[in-house]
């Protein structure tokens, strides 16, 4: 098909956004103009136009090279959010990969840009207008996989799976010191102090049972790479149990901080990542399994270790 080229010089009467100029020039619909911009058909003063909202001024030359018989569909925009990336999404739930440094939900201080807020904003842009309903959490300085229901009913079904310890949750951690056992289990009773720190203590009506299974993946000179599988999911569970055993997670600012410090761990985050998440889909019953690559901070530390 022959391509058509149209050009116009912007005068004082049609300054503003480039899409308005292109609509007048080509007699096209708004969606067609968005599609033409996305497919590189529009230029301003010879340079490709990247956005329909680009402003144009008097004297600018707007040109279009397009096939008038073709329907130009707008390209799906990649969601850009530093707090998370989408690992999976359907009509019922969404699995995201959370960035370290992001709170899952706001505290009493009403922080903004929490994960639940950012995922809710993402979902508000979809046609279905679903909501992000909390199922479980990750600590602020921990990265990795989190699932949200898109309505309260789905979230409640997923929460019930977590209560029954059905989901598979595997974490990667770099801990201080060299762990001698190849694998093991921490079975503890956790309590909460006045400053909200957690600690291991004797069983009582106020304590929570915490069970973590671990295996050593790699031993280094003064640190150990481990995989920790949660049987229970209590707040700060992995961090508290490994610290209690004398192997705090590198960079932990709350539990055995001096021992958790390492000359080569210079990140503000801690060396803990929720790498795998498995559960049963609450609608289809299908076994769902998701894996997240190691964040660069952990990968770089391992690459420089012996």
Image (spheres, rainbow, N blue to C red):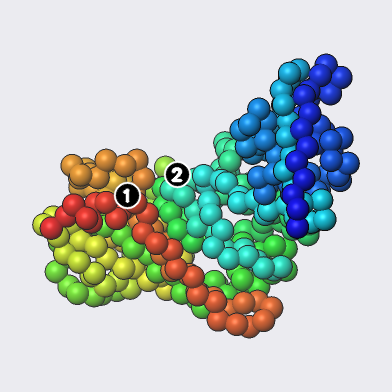
| Helix, strand or loop status at disc 2 | loop
Q: Is residue 216 something one can see in this rendering?
A: yes
Q: Position of residue 74 (x, y in %)?
A: 73, 52
Q: Quadrant of residue 159?
A: bottom right
Could you tell whether 273 is left or right of 46 in the image?
left
Q: Is residue 257 left or right of residue 232?
A: left
Q: Where does label 2 land, which residue?
A: 101
Q: How many marks?
A: 2
Q: In 3D space, how far apart are the residues under numbered discs 1 and 2 (Cα atoms)?
A: 13 Å
Percent coordinates x, y for residue 70 in the rendering: 79, 56
Question: Depth check: 161 or 101 in front?
Answer: 101
Up/down of 160 relative to 192, above or below: below
Residues 154 and 50: in front is 50
Q: Residue at x 34, y 68 (%)?
A: 228
User: What is the quadrant of the N terminus in the image?
Assistant: bottom right
Instruction: Judge by depth and name the residue closer to the eye, 70 or 29.
Output: 70
Which residue was labeled with disc 1? 297
- Residue drawn at x 13%, y 58% is 306
Q: Residue furthest front?
A: 2
Q: Residue at x 23, y 70 (%)?
A: 216
Position of 251 compared to 133: left or right? left
Q: Is residue 103 left or right of residue 174?
A: right
Mark 1 or 2 closer to N-term?
A: 2
Which residue does the image show at 72% across and 63% down from the upper left?
A: 151
Residue 218, how many percent across, how many down?
20, 66
């Amino acid at each position: 098909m022959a391509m058509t080229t149209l050009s116009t010089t912007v005068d004082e009467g049609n300054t503003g956004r480039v899409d308005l100029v292109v609509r007048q020039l080509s007699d096209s619909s708004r969606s067609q103009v968005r599609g033409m911009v996305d497919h590189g058909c529009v230029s301003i003063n010879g340079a490709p136009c990247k956005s329909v909202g680009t402003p144009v001024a008097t004297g600018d030359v707007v040109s279009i090279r397009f096939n008038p018989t073709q329907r130009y569909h707008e390209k799906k925009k990649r969601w850009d959010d530093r707090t998370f990336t989408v690992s999976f999404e359907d009509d019922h739930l969404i699995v995201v990969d959370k960035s370290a440094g992001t709170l899952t939900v706001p505290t009493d201080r009403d922080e903004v840009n929490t994960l639940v807020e950012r995922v809710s904003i993402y979902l508000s842009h979809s046609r279905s207008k679903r909501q992000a309903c909390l199922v479980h959490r990750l600590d602020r300085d921990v990265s990795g996989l989190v699932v949200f229901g898109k309505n309260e009913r789905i979230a409640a079904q997923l929460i019930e799976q977590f209560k029954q310890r059905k989901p598979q949750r595997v974490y990667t951690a770099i801990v201080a010191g060299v762990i001698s056992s190849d694998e093991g289990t921490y079975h503890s009773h956790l309590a909460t102090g006045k400053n909200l720190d957690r600690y291991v203590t004797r069983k009582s009506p106020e304590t929570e049972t915490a069970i973590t299974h671990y295996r050593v993946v790699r031993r280094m000179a003064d640190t150990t790479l481990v995989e920790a599988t949660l049987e229970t999911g209590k707040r700060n569970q992995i961090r508290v149990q490994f610290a209690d055993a004398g192997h705090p997670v590198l960079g932990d600012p709350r539990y055995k901080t001096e021992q958790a410090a390492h000359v080569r761990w210079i990140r503000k985050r801690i060396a803990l990542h929720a790498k795998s998440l498995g559960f049963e889909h609450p609608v289809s019953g299908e076994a769902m399994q998701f894996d997240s690559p190691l964040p660069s901070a952990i990968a770089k530390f391992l690459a420089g270790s012996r």
